Amino acid sequence: MQKNKAELLQGTLDLLVLKTVETMGPLHGWAIAKRIEQISEDLLEMKYGTLYPALMRLEQRGWISSEWGASENNRRARFYSITRQGRKQLAREAKSWEQMAAFIARVLGGAL
Amino acid sequence: MMTFRSLASRLCALLRPREWDERVDEELEFHIGMQTEENIRRGMAPLDARAAAHRKIGNRTQVCEEVHRMNTISFVEETAGNVRISLRTMRRNPGFALTAVLVLALGLGASTAMFGALDRILFRPLPYADADRLVNLGWTQRGGGATPGQMLTLIGRGYRENWKPAPDPLTAVTTIVRSVETCDVTEQQPERLRCARVESNFLQTMGVRPALGRDFTPEDDVRGAPPVAIISHEVWTRRFGADPGAIGRTIELNGRPIPIVGVLSEGFTLPAADAEILQPQQIFPLPPDMVMPDGRRAMNVGGSLTVFGRLKPGITPEQARSALAPLIEENEKGLPRVSEDQGQPRVAPLRDYMVGDASRAAWLLLGAVAGLLLIACVNVANLILARIAARNREFAVRSALGAGRGRLARLALTESLLLAVAGGGLGLLLAAGMLRVFVQLAPSSIPEIEQASLDLRVFAVAAVLALAAGTVVGIWPALSVLRSRALQCGARGAAAARPRMRFTLVTVQIALTVAMLAGSALLLRTLWNLVAVPLGYESERVVIMNVALTPALYPTGSRLPFFERLLERIREIPGTAAATMGNPARPGAVGIVTSPSVDRRPRPPDDGTRFRVREVTPGYFQTFGISILRGRAFEESDRRAKPVAILSESAAQILFPGQDPIGHTVDVFVNEWADVVGVARDIRDGPTQKPEPELYILPRRNLPFEISTTYFAIRTQAGADDAIALLKQAVADLDPRVPVTPEPLSDQVARLTERPRFVAWLLSAFAGLALLLAATGLYGVASYLVTQRTRDIGVRIALGAAPSDISRQVLREAGRWIAAGAVLGCALAWAGTRAIEAQLYGVSSHDPVSWIAALVVLCVALLLAVLRPATRAARVDPMEALRAD
């Protein structure tokens, strides 16, 4: 069952989280995880455990901010939103990711 | 320990990690809750739903730990843990910890003490502003100073004409009168101080200002201006109770009240001299009609000066030397030559002037002590390595429990750092004691050593040394832990790789020891040679004292009569075999002249030879045991008859080559012809100096100038202490205001060789310690190997090997290490001989005797060290060895 699922590439989790928070507005951790899984159409195997350290890392770097709020079912949850610095970082990372992806596509497409 | 822990937790609290811990906990709980709900919605049973949610999270503890690590200074916590573990292990094996700490303390203590002693010479900033721009310059000649080998840099007094304003590339130039003279305070609490005469811009050039009052002005320095003085902080405190009102009061010097205009700041010293009172030079201007025979102006009338200059920024002393050399040379013309050395212009950094060639000896000692520290570190590394081998299992277990390699390496490093800190602390105590000993032993010719202290800077160096030692010591074992593949390698696998490393360590130790032993053997031979050089006189049983008369109390014409009365008195001291005025141990002669004319012929042209004229009284040769080779010594009756002279061997050879000088005449002072009545054996100022030609005459009366200071000496049958007391009494009987400090001549002579003695003994002590450490190290490794091979040895004995074969094998193996170390050490020392060459006398740095002696001492000591392990190996009981595992 797990064999077909791709491992999350090193360093891509930050990018995914930033993008998700940017487009969806303030989200709590579980929603972010769900959203990423949903978009990947279950192709990605994601250990949720890795998400929370990543969120805290991003927050410590000042790319996202967080505050307590009430969830849909009225529980206390932490909501994350992107900061201005986070947007800049996202733009930078997205660009370099695209370049990398294009390059890999070219290599795999037989450019060599 | 507790404080460490509470400190760590407080630090963590400061960064609020608990808040983060709680937060991640809450978030995970929320996440699991949401996931469980979703799972239930999908139709799972509630319990399964929650378990699945947990699974999806992964290892929750790990997540918490990761966040925790991210947010705490986990380093502190881990270190605290490591420290706890290390202390526990050390308590369990106190022998190891004690040895390691002692060895490190020895190395660190010796190096800290040595650094403290030499810091002032080599590193400490001088008490002047921008001291690296200050230089000493002038014409330099070897010898002539009080200390053998000291450089004397002088300039003629005429320098003021050519050197004002300061020539490029100097921004300022200043002088002090060459010799700092004693001066007597002749008011209440009479005492003898040292007075220096400086140019009015001296303090300004050095970049210092008086702490109180004013500096000298150019007007103070004009010949005939009212005299003024600047006093040292110490005199100000001692004589004036640190009263600011001292400015404007007077101090009576040599019978003359001098107004005080300034007080120097605390800790100020003149370069390479000590003086409590500064006065302006007030040098008379050169008379315009003073002309040298060749028509040039005489620039050096009235003695010579020591010159200091301040360089423009960015100019090196070498650049300044090439720019200033012609000017210095011009000035030098006709400076009195103090030896046959022709000399040369010199511009040197101030520190070089102050420290002189002492810095070479200082570097040598620092090098030796660094070697000792290295050996100590290697020794401890070896000890730790042995421990690590024994603790393989422990590390394997730790690794199995999840400790990463980095963590294990850090643990090993923590242990060695702890050892280093303990060793450093103990070493500091040791250093304080050793420094005392160094200062006691140190020769006066190593400048300022008596002020050496263990201060904060020295402490900082000790701390850095300790930590560096800890790292060095820890790095090897830590690397070996990193390389060891914990659980899957049994004790054997790891141990197999290690003897080579331990062998390397022992070899390095032996090599360093060989180098130090060879160095100290060379220095000891040098010392032997120096002591064996005959100085030409007998210093045993002679007591000598310097008597200086203040011109204020004893005007010209009264001093020689005083000296003669004093001589009469000391002749009557019981036990006195002979008494005289004069001192052969001091170069201080009455005059230095060019070759005198002989037999009423015209004066020969100056060929650079200098003769020393010594005024001595009859009894001189007898008192000092200087043999008369031809003719006779002076007699009392000579004083009333026509002038007579005695030549030294070398003087006789120069003046009357191939003839008997007795009966010839010599011009001892502008057409004062003296009959040569005897030839005396040559004397030397010091063991490394060549004998200077000497011309002995009797003291002359009725001269316009008169000596104010002279030496008195007695050859006594009594003990030195009695003689000293009686000499003091004799002077006090005549005039209690004249202070004297008689001392045995042998003490003065011993001082001639005190620096080589100091360096040789210290280096030998260090080499001895190094040998001890190397022997301990070798003993440790050999015993370890024998223990490890007990099984193999047991098998061999069981198979019929003779015990002597076994011990021979151990010895052979140790012999291989020793040989490797010795070869490496010889190569090392051979390459380093240049460092020691300057300290040697009468022995080549490649002297085979010294080298062989060093190697013999090494081999004997090290073979003794392995003898015990070797015999232990031979006594292995095969049955027990085989049963062991």
Image (spheres, coloured by chain):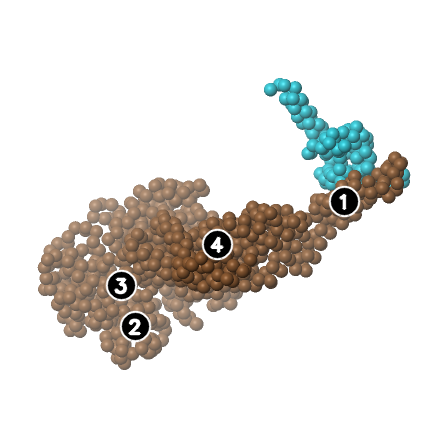
Chain colours: A cyan, B brown
Quadrant of the rendered image containing residue A75:
top right
Q: Which corner quadrant holds the C terminus of chain B?
A: bottom right
Q: Earlier in the sequence, mark 3 or mark 1?
A: 1
Q: Which corner quadrant holds the N terminus of chain B?
A: bottom right
Question: Mark 4 against mark 3, which lies toward the viewer?
Answer: 4
Question: Mark 3 against mark 1, which lies toward the viewer?
Answer: 1
- Which three-letter amino acid code belongs to the residue tagged 4? Val
User: Label 4 marks which chain's residue?
Assistant: B
- Which three-letter amino acid code belongs to the residue tagged 3? Ala
Instruction: Tell me the tag on residue B198.
Output: none
Give percent across and percent down for residue B838: 33, 53
Q: Earlier in the sequence, mark 2 or mark 1?
A: 1
The alpha-carbon separation of the residues under discs 4 and 3 comes to: 39 Å
The alpha-carbon separation of the residues under discs 3 and 2 comes to: 21 Å
Q: Is residue B796 left or right of residue B609?
A: right
Marks 3 and 2 close (CB-CB < 8 Å): no
- Which three-letter amino acid code belongs to the residue tagged 1? Arg
- Crowding near the residue tagged with mark 1, few <14, some 14–19, many ≥20 C-alpha atoms within 10 Å: some
Residue identifier under label 1: B60
On whether disc 2 and disc 4 are found on a single subunit, the reply is yes
Marks 4 and 3 close (CB-CB < 8 Å): no
Residue identifier under label 3: B532
Instruction: Tell me the tag on residue B543.
Output: 2
Marks 2 and 1 close (CB-CB < 8 Å): no
Q: Earlier in the sequence, mark 2 or mark 4?
A: 4
Residue B688, visible in the rendered structure: yes
